[in-house]
Image (tube, helix red, strand yellow):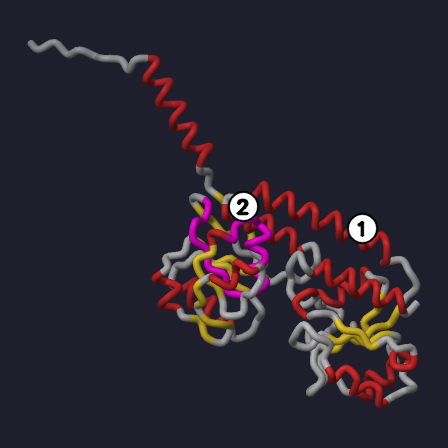
């Protein structure tokens, strides 16, 4: 009858195996965050290849310390400078789905703006891609998004530090300006047709922390079209325009046709570079500081 021998795993080997397994768990923990659409996003390990589908998202990924992991982005991502050399895959009206899939991204970050872009988001999700939807509404959403992106990219310490710096700067602006005497504001996105913002828009939140009041805060549409007559009737203390470039738009001076307007009479037709105020990024605090100073001059 054969003798069956039971061998034991040497204690030292078992201990080594346990330590290696423990190290692996610590080294690559599963990651899960909740995006702005309320969806839980799960990754088994930090993303190595990320695709950004909007300019503000590209900036936020760089702010999270993960700019080097962006494999491709939309046609309009132009900040920071390093973003200009990243592969392009289209814009909100047309995304090159085939190229996106060929890049085999670990994570796609998309802007959920409720417009044509959403069709592409649904298609990418249907194709089993991991999609994080970014649609910040409040200023507090910006650092929270950066921290989430840092978690997903494995750069959370950098993202957390920069987000805290943003919160500290934001608090400083609020403490300095929000309690000052009220200044009424018309924010002009475009002139023909005449477009503005309502109280839910992030720009309106910036106006508020500067001690201002958006004259169209109660409108239901986020970016509504309004008439010149309604602006004249409201007679704002300040008119601020953005336009589509880095220079003061010449059409801002169209308001000079109404010299009795308070903003015209007191020379408060102002301009802010759109990328500093209309993108939901850390640079919005630069725009906030400019806007606060513009309102201060009107007090």
Using the image, determine if residue 76 lies above or below residue 86: below
Q: Quadrant of the C terminus?
A: bottom right
- Ranked by sequence position, the earlier of labels 2 and 1 is 2
Q: Quadrant of the N terminus?
A: top left
Q: Which residue is mark 1?
A: 172
Which mark is in front, 2 or 1?
A: 1
Magenta region: which residues?
46-67
- Secondary structure category for the residue under label 1: helix
- Secondary structure category for the residue under label 2: helix
Give percent across and percent down for residue 111: 55, 65
**Which residue is depicted at the point 43% across and 64% down?**
87
User: Is the C-beta separation of discs 2 and 1 under 8 Å?
Assistant: no
Using the image, determine if residue 240 lies above or below residue 283: below
Does residue 192 show up magenta in the picture?
no
Give percent across and percent down for residue 179: 89, 58
Does residue 48 show up magenta in the picture?
yes
Left or right: residue 25 versus residue 167 is left
Q: How many marks?
A: 2
Residue 135 seen from this side? yes
Q: Quadrant of residue 22?
A: top left
Give percent across and percent down for residue 185: 83, 73
Left or right: residue 4 versus residue 115 is left
Q: Which mark is residue 151?
A: 2
Residue 220 seen from this side? no
């Amino acid at each position: 009858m054969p003798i069956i021998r039971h061998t034991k795993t040497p204690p030292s080997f078992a201990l080594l195996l346990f330590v290696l397994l423990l190290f692996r768990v610590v080294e690559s923990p599963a990651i899960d965050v909740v995006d702005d659409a309320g969806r839980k996003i799960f990754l088994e390990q930090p993303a190595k290849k990320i695709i950004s589908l909007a300019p503000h998202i590209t900036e936020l990924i760089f702010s999270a310390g993960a700019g080097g992991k962006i494999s491709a982005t939309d046609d309009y991502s132009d900040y920071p400078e390093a973003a200009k050399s990243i592969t392009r895959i289209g814009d909100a009206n047309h995304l090159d789905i085939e190229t996106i899939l060929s890049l085999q991204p670990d994570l796609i970050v998309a802007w959920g703006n409720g417009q044509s872009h959403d069709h592409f988001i649904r298609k990418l999700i249907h194709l089993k891609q991991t999609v994080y939807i970014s649609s910040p509404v409040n200023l507090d959403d910006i650092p929270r998004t950066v921290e989430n992106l840092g978690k997903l990219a494995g750069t959370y310490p950098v993202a957390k530090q920069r987000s805290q710096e943003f919160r500290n700067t934001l608090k400083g602006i609020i403490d300095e300006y929000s309690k000052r005497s009220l200044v009424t504001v018309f924010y002009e996105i475009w002139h023909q047709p005449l477009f503005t913002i309502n109280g839910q828009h992030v720009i309106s939140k910036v106006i508020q922390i500067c001690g201002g009041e958006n004259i169209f805060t109660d409108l239901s549409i986020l970016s509504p079209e309004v008439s010149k007559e309604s602006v004249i009737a409201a007679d704002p203390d300040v008119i601020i325009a953005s336009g589509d470039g880095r220079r003061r738009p010449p059409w801002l001076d169209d308001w000079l046709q109404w010299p009795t307007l308070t903003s015209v009479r007191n020379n408060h037709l102002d301009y802010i570079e759109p990328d500093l105020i209309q993108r939901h990024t850390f640079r919005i605090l630069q725009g906030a500081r400019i806007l606060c100073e513009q309102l201060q001059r009107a007090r």
